């Protein structure tokens, strides 16, 4: 296949799976997903019709060149790696994972870091028990397409009681606009384990008329008492569409921290959801975004409380420039029986241009009486009083505004667990904010 | 050359309502002037108009600092020329640390190519924070965010100390301070007194003036300075209140611009 697939179903999904020599169960599973993809409708995010987005260019299988050491990776990739890439690292280049590095020490503790394609063979049982159970194949057309076509991907398994100090890094990189680029990330943190995972999605697509569809998914399973810190920074070229469905399922007393920079330069649809099943489980989500030019973005955070005394906090902060539009949804749902649950959310949008648009939609759905829930939302311009205050100390208007805008995003930036990536984030923001 | 600050016939309005009805005041380097008066008489408006707050429109008058026309300058230029206003309600700014902000402000004054070294800056800031008995962690806290009233006031004085202005306006710096904090803030101000620097202290109360001795005291009512004197005037106001001034001048309602 040399031209991008514009329609596909059961046969196409199976053909790709077979060409990669995938196990029979997966070929069949993808076939079913292919059927669903034909049948199901696109999701309908609030006030953001997807009908005009180019979502039917699925690309072709274009695996990257596998290497055995970081230094053999293409320079364009190593340039994206934060300086201290001595820890665990996995790299996907276009349609396949090309490098995996994990210390012997972590391997000896039973930690597994591998591509999803590898894990379907080596850890079939564990994988099938979790894979696409938090983000189902039949949610909508995009999830079905993802299920049918996902490639490369990351499988991270952290055994009981294992605490990993150094963040584990994943770099998902694409430089072929016609490649299928649909990674799936699966993190399983067993009881009382703890891990930080840092994911970066980047591209170098150059001048192209093709639309690259990054239709990705993340599933995190935190078992009793486990802590997972998940940081993500997405910054692909404007010709790409970024779809990222992120899900965490939390058992008793477990914790997820989402720290997300949705800084992609093209249309963006992200949905970051924590399912607080366990009693005493906690979720903390911090999302920042910057919209420029005529970008369309739909950014959703969700927390679903099922367990008693579960707590969630969700913060989304977005800066909108030029003619960009962002619809920011926060959904806190507290189910009957989730007594003493506490769900809080804040959405803040800073508008830097009269043509930019930012909507904040906080939604609280509460079916239990004995709970706390709250929301705050604001959409506004740079605060004139703050500018005056900074200027009254001799800072120019331009610098004052710059400080305030960068400061607006800092509560998330400063939480990124890798210093190198934090600096990179500053550079990305510098570029996007101008 | 010693600082010369002069206000002549200053009138200012907010949303079309005239608040300052012609202020004349001359402050020389080394002098401390206190402006006292009940609430709503235009004291804080004077401070904001001098600094250039965008809501306050100056309709008449002149203000010069060492011969330079202050009213022609933008807010940031006024600051760089040597004006400093310790505000009654300092803004809280998320994401901007106290130290980043102060270093930016110092460098804005020093100009490009003449930036203060990080080490030197940290040493200076730490030293001044110690004098003000501020917890060192305030260096890395977001600017005024979550600070108590007293911490905000100390932080204003910290900025004054590091920016070394020529003319300092303190707007109700004593409000909301307990006696210890008041003493510390006053010591900070006294440490900055020298013959190059003038002070304009705006306050309701005499108590700050027990610690910072003024050379001149002015009473403001109805948007004007209605009475001036030496330190003894402040003492009399503390003892007897403002009614005798109103009586003496035949003023019934001392406020201005109140709806």
Image: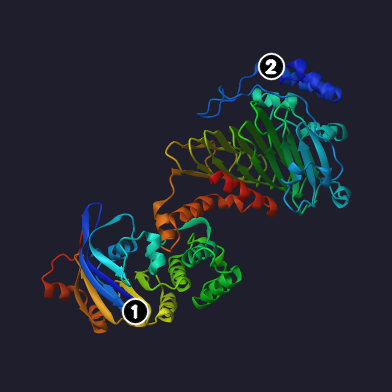
Q: Residue at x 61, y 35 (%)?
A: A271
Residue A199, x across and y down, in percent = 70, 43
Q: Residue at x 20, y 74 (%)?
A: B242
Please tell me in which quadrant of the rendered image residue A209 appears.
top right
Q: Is residue A334 visible?
A: no
Left or right of residue B49, residue A322 in this image: right
Q: Nearer the viewer, residue B235 or A223?
A: B235
**Total numbered circles:** 2
Q: Estimate the spatial distance between the alpha carbons at disc 2 and disc 1, rounded to whole Å.
A: 81 Å
In the rendered view, would you say A325 is above or below A75?
above
In the rendered view, would you say B46 is above or below A252?
below
Q: Nearer the viewer, residue B222 or A192?
A: B222
Q: Quadrant of the N terminus of chain A?
A: top right
| SS class, disc 1 | loop
Which is closer to the viewer, label 2 or label 1?
Answer: 1
Q: Residue at x 71, y 37 (%)?
A: A219
Residue A430, x across and y down, in percent = 57, 48
Q: Which residue is mark 1?
A: B29
In the rendered view, would you say A209 is above or below A311?
above
Please rate how many residues cluster around mark 2, counting C-alpha atoms within 10 Å: few if below 14, some from 14 to 19, many from 20. few
Q: Which residue is mark 2?
A: A7
Same subunit, tags 2 and 1: no
């Amino acid at each position: 296949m040399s031209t991008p697939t514009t329609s596909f179903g059961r046969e196409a999904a199976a053909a790709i799976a077979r060409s990669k020599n995938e196990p029979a169960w997966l070929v069949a599973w993808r076939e079913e997903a292919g059927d669903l993809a034909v049948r199901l409708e696109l999701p309908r995010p609030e006030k953001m019709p997807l009908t005009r987005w180019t979502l039917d260019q699925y690309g072709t299988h274009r695996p990257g060149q596998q290497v055995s050491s970081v230094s053999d990776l293409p320079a364009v990739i190593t340039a994206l790696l934060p300086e201290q890439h001595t820890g665990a690292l996995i790299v996907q280049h276009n349609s396949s994972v090309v490098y995996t590095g994990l210390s012997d020490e972590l391997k000896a503790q039973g930690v597994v870091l591998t591509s999803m394609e590898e894990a379907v063979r080596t850890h079939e049982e564990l994988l099938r028990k979790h894979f696409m159970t938090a983000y189902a194949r039949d949610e909508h057309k995009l999830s079905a397409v993802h299920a049918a076509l996902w490639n490369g991907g990351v499988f991270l398994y952290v055994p009981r009681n294992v605490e990993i100090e150094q963040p584990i890094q994943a770099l998902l990189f694409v430089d072929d606009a016609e490649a299928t680029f649909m990674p799936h990330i699966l993190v399983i943190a067993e009881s009382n384990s703890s891990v930080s995972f840092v994911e970066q999605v980047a591209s170098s697509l150059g001048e192209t008329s093709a639309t690259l569809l990054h239709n990705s998914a993340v599933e995190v399973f935190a078992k009793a008492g486990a802590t997972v810190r998940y940081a993500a920074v997405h910054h692909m070229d404007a010709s790409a569409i970024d779809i990222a469905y992120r899900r965490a399922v939390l058992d008793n007393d477990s914790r997820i921290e989402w720290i997300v920079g949705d800084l992609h330069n093209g249309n963006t649809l992200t949905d970051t959801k924590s399912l607080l099943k366990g009693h005493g489980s906690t979720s903390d989500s911090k999302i920042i975004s910057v919209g420029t030019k005529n970008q369309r973005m739909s950014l959703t955070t969700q927390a679903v409380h099922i367990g008693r005394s579960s707590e969630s906090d969700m913060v989304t902060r977005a800066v909108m420039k030029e003619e960009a539009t962002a619809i920011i949804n926060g959904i806190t749902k507290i189910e009957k029986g989730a007594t003493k649950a506490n769900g809080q959310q804040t959405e803040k949008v800073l508008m830097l241009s009269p043509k930019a648009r930012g909507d904040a939609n906080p939604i609280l759905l509460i079916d239990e009486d004995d709970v706390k829930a709250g929301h705050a939302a604001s959409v506004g311009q740079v605060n004139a009083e703050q500018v005056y205050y900074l200027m009254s100390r001799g800072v120019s208007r331009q610098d004052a505004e710059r400080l305030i805008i960068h400061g607006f995003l800092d509560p998330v930036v400063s939480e990124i667990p890798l210093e190198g990536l934090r600096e990179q984030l500053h550079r990305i923001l510098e570029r996007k904010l101008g | 050359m010693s600082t010369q600050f002069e206000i002549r016939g200053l009138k200012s309005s907010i949303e079309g309502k005239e608040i300052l009805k012609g202020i004349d005041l001359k402050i020389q380097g080394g002098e401390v002037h206190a402006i006292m008066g009940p609430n709503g008489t235009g004291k804080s408006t004077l401070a904001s108009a001098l600094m250039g707050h965008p809501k306050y429109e100056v309709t008449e008058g002149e203000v010069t600092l060492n011969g330079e026309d202050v009213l022609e300058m933008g807010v940031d230029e006024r600051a760089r020329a040597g004006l400093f206003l310790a505000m009654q309600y300092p803004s809280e700014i998320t994401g901007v640390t106290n130290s980043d902000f102060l270093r930016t402000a110092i460098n804005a004054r020093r100009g490009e190519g003449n930036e203060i070294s990080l080490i030197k800056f940290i040493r200076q800031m730490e030293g001044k924070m110690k004098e003000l008995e501020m917890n060192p962690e305030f260096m890395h806290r977001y600017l005024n965010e979550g600070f108590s009233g007293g911490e905000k006031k100390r932080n204003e004085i910290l900025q004054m100390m590091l920016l070394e202005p020529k003319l300092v306006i303190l707007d109700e710096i004593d409000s909301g301070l307990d006696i210890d904090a008041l003493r510390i803030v006053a010591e900070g101000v006294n440490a900055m007194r020298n013959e190059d620097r003038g002070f304009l202290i705006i306050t309701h109360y005499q108590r700050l003036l027990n610690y910072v001795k003024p050379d001149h005291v002015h009473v403001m009512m109805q948007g004007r300075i209605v009475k001036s004197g030496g330190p003894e005037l402040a003492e009399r106001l503390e003892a007897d209140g403002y009614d005798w001034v109103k009586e003496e001048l035949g003023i019934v309602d001392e406020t201005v611009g109140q709806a």
